[in-house]
Amino acid sequence: MKDPTTYFPGDSLNEADPPGLSAFRSSRRAFIKGVIASGAVAASSGYLLSGCAPGEGPAAGSVERLISLNVNGRIRRVDVLPNETLAMTLRYKLGLTGTKLACDRGECGACTVVIDGMTNYSCSTLTHTVGSRSVRTIEGLEGPDGELHPIQQAFIDELGPQCGFCTPGQIMSTVVLLERNPKPTRDEARRALSGNLCRCGAYDHYLNSVMRAAEVI
């Protein structure tokens, strides 16, 4: 005879039900129904607690979902969740996949973007905190005809990238450095890029790239 705990509602038996099987089936069915019912209640309560009736705006204290972002000189309207990070918005809502997600905890710098002239880890920046501030990503560096920015070309000339995953963040950090200090020393460049990790260990190549870019900008 099968173990009664292996039977599920709807199973057919070729022999008489073992003792307790009917009770087991009933209790399991009641449990499943309870889970479904509780899920429906939770979903509806979230809507009710939001304080919004159909067609109304957000409740007091909540955030507006549809916001405007100034990204690479363009105003972009985008639907943003309250807890959504800028990296997620850029990549999956605006299609700007040059901003990389790696550690997703503000440690590696692959997601570095420039906000109002300062480097920021976009994986640790809530999109709703950006507001009307100016956001620049790696895509915003190209020229009007698609030509590379001098910093990007310098990175290529010095063979800076290896796997290339950290390169956008390294470049954006270099952009801010050279805008503030057009002629940095190698040590100054090292400090400016210290927040960008390279799993390939190509740090000297990146520093060579920064120094070359400083010569041509």
Image: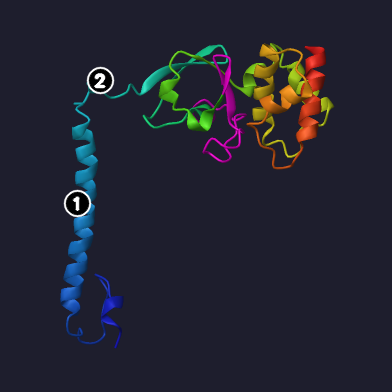
Is mark 2 in CB contact (under 8 Å) with mark 1?
no
Q: Where is residue 203 in the image (x, y as percent from the top left)?
A: 76, 35
Image quarter of residue 186:
top right
Tag on residue 9?
none
Q: Which of marks 2 and 1 is nearer the N terminus?
A: 1
Residue 27 on the magenta segment? no
Q: What residue type is labelled 2?
A: Gly
Q: Which quadrant of the rendered structure holds the N terminus?
A: bottom left
- Crowding at dot 2, Cα within 10 Å, few <14 / some 14-19 / many 20+, comes out as few
Secondary structure that dominates the magenta span: loop
Q: In this view, does 17 lie to the left or right of 214?
A: left
Q: Distance between the residues labelled 2 and 1?
A: 28 Å
Tag on residue 57?
2
145 versus 164 height, above or below: above
- Per the image, the residue denoted by label 1 is 37
Q: In this view, does 84 lie to the left or right of 166?
A: left
Q: Which amino acid does label 1 sit on?
A: Ala
Rendered residue at 20%/72% (across/down):
25
Q: Give the range drawn in magenta.
A: 91-119
Q: Position of residue 21 (x, y in %)?
A: 20, 79
- Crowding at dot 1, Cα within 10 Å, few <14 / some 14-19 / many 20+, comes out as few
Q: Which sits in the foreground, 60 or 54?
A: 60
Rendered residue at 81%/27% (across/down):
208
**Residue 88 shows in the view:** no
Image quarter of residue 131:
top left
Rendered residue at 82%/20% (across/down):
212
